[in-house]
Amino acid sequence: MISTSGNLFLSGATGQIGSRLVHELVRLGRPSTLLTRNPEKATSYWDSALTPDKRPLVRIVGGDPQIPGDWQEHISEATGVVNLVGESLFAKRWSTSFKQTLRDSRTRPTVLIRKTLIQANNRCPWVNASAIGFYGASGPGIMDESSPPGNDFLASLSGDWERELFSNPIEGQRRIALRTGIVLDPKGGALAKMLPLFRLGIGGALGLGTYPTSWIHQADITGLIIHALDCEKVDGPLNGVSPHPVSNREFAKTLAKVLHRPALFPAPVFALRTVLGEVAMAIASGREVRPRVALETGYSFRFPFLEGALIDLLG
């Protein structure tokens, strides 16, 4: 288990997953050092979000995770490292330059963290974000952590990310690639974008709605990160998905049911591509991914089924 007297180093702490993780660490009484490009804003947020007795558990450090700096000193003595930094896939259309931005925002921080840990000979566990895009946007069969990579852009992006994570291993150190699926959180990510349409009763499946949707409740993705840090058996890829993926049609039907709305209007894929470009294919396709490592190492999902997860988040 992570020492409660040391500090967990966390980059990406103001993002969708990172902010939830910090709150959970505070609840558990585990101190953390948060790297942010805007320390004043982060300090103001955490000062208002935490009670005075809890504020000492969170330390803010300013710096750019893509550029070497004094922030790296905090990694040397860390009792665990979590890196969740990466430009959103949905921030812009996928131009050639933006694809490079997506790649750089993932690989550069990973390289700097790796080099810092090696130089300090720090063997603390390191959880680094990745994505189930590693397996490719579409294809038959059930994917688990032993499955091969795909051959599209998202697979290449995740593959490069993980290559930097696993390069030059330190003997005795565990490095975990957290391959996340769709993280359900009404305050951010895919679910937040869907809710306005579904609440108006004009939401629905994408295209034919037959492709798998591999999802996870926000509480379980933070739970899995802590499990990965604590459990000595977790080492290598770790799928951050529920044990029960559903088809996109079933996802839309269940979301509409929980909101007490109809789901009658499927979104044509060609219309998505017209509006969003190549990123539309990442939305309108998917793989059936299972969390084999999480289950084999004893993680117990709080929300294994979609309806229960959505009721908890939206009820």
Image (spheres, rainbow, N blue to C red):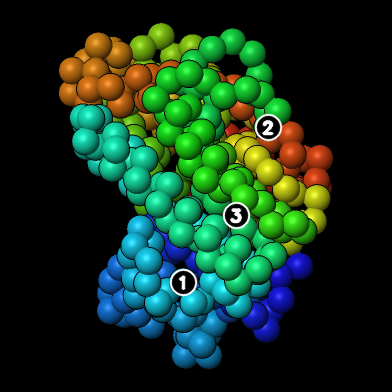
Kindly identify which residue carries mark 3: 127
Give the mark nearest the N terminus, 2 or 3: 3
Disc 3 vs disc 1: which is toward the camera? Answer: 1
Give residue 266's quadrant in the image: top left
Q: What element carries label 2?
A: loop
**Crowd class of label 3 (few under 14; some 14 to 19; many from 20; radius 10 Å):** many
Kindly identify which residue carries mark 1: 72
Residue type at mark 3?
Val
- Residue 195 appearing in the image: no
Instruction: Compute the Cα span from label 3 to label 1.
Output: 16 Å
**Crowd class of label 1 (few under 14; some 14 to 19; many from 20; radius 10 Å):** many
- What residue is at 67 percent from the left and 61 percent from the top? 125
Instruction: Compute the Cα span from label 2 to label 3.
Output: 15 Å
- What residue is at 54 percent from the left and 71 percent from the top? 75
Estimate the x, y position of residue 124 in percent, counting from the top left. Answer: 68, 66
- What residue is at 68 percent from the left and 79 percent from the top? 4
**Crowd class of label 2 (few under 14; some 14 to 19; many from 20; radius 10 Å):** many
Residue type at mark 2?
Glu
Residue 146 horizontal side relative to residue 262, left or right: right
Estimate the x, y position of residue 150 in percent, counting from the top left. Answer: 52, 20
Residue 128 horizontal side relative to residue 106, left or right: right
Kindly identify which residue carries mark 2: 145
- 153 over 56 or under it: above or below: above
